Image (cartoon, rainbow, N blue to C red):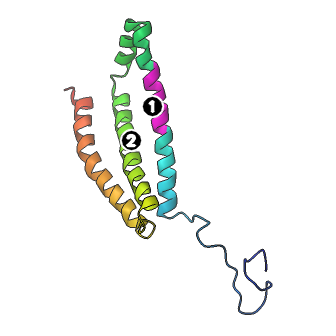
Amino acid sequence: MDPATGTGSAPGTPGTARRRPAGTLYRGREGMWSWVAHRISGVVLFFFLLVHVLDTSLVRVSPEAYDRVIETYKNPIVGLAEVGLVAAFLFHALNGLRVVLVDFWSQGTRYHRHLLYGVLGVWVLLMLPFTVRHLGFVFGGE
């Protein structure tokens, strides 16, 4: 067995092709990018929850300090960041359901690409109205 090719014949033997084990390397396809986006969105959500717990805990220490911190959040930059936060949360949740289907449905791996496109479609359908409404509040002053 040739360890470099994973085949039963020596390298250079006519009729043998260099093959890599199937399914072990990502090549930038949908599966890899959904994996990367899922990890990034999870890290974003982790840091948001950390900040949220810390700023909310100020209520017990000093309600005035809490009010000052919350007041600093009322600006357009944070409003735009909230759109990103909701986008990360929604993608993470929908993609998590896709991962469950891929893991526990016998046909999941066969249809993982279709499921990802479904996740992205539902994500866009939910994000568009939210973004329009939220940015109306942020920049419209309602």
Q: Quadrant of the N terminus?
A: bottom right
Q: Which numbered dot is residue 13?
A: none
Percent coordinates x, y for residue 47 in the rendering: 49, 32
Tally of marks:
2
Please give left or right for residue 55 compared with residue 3 in the image: left
The three-letter amino acid code for the residue at tag 2 is Phe
Q: Which residue is drawn at the image coordinates 75% and 84% (left, top)? A: 8
The three-letter amino acid code for the residue at tag 1 is Phe
Neighbor class of circle 1 (other Cα within 10 Å; few <14, some 14-19, many 20+) is: few
Percent coordinates x, y for residue 103 in the rendering: 46, 59
Percent coordinates x, y for residue 4 in the rendering: 77, 74
Determine whether the residue tagged by mark 1 lies in a helix, strand or loop: helix
Query: Magenta segment range?
Result: 44-54
Above or below, 39 against 16 in this view is above
- The answer to whether mark 2 and mark 1 are in CB contact below 8 A is no
> Is 61 inside the magenta-drawn segment?
no
> Is 47 inside the magenta-drawn segment?
yes
Q: Which residue is drawn at the image coordinates 50% and 54% (left, top)? A: 35
Q: Quadrant of residue 102?
A: bottom left
Q: Which residue is drawn at the image coordinates 45% and 30% (left, top)? A: 49
Neighbor class of circle 2 (other Cα within 10 Å; few <14, some 14-19, many 20+) is: some
Q: Which numbered dot is residue 48?
A: 1
Comes first in the chain, label 2 or label 1 = 1
Mark 2–mark 1 Cα distance, whole angstroms, equals 10 Å
Please give left or right for residue 20 compared with residue 78 in the image: right
Magenta region's main secondary structure? helix
**Which residue has dot 2 on it?**
89
Please give left or right for residue 91 compared with residue 138 in the image: right
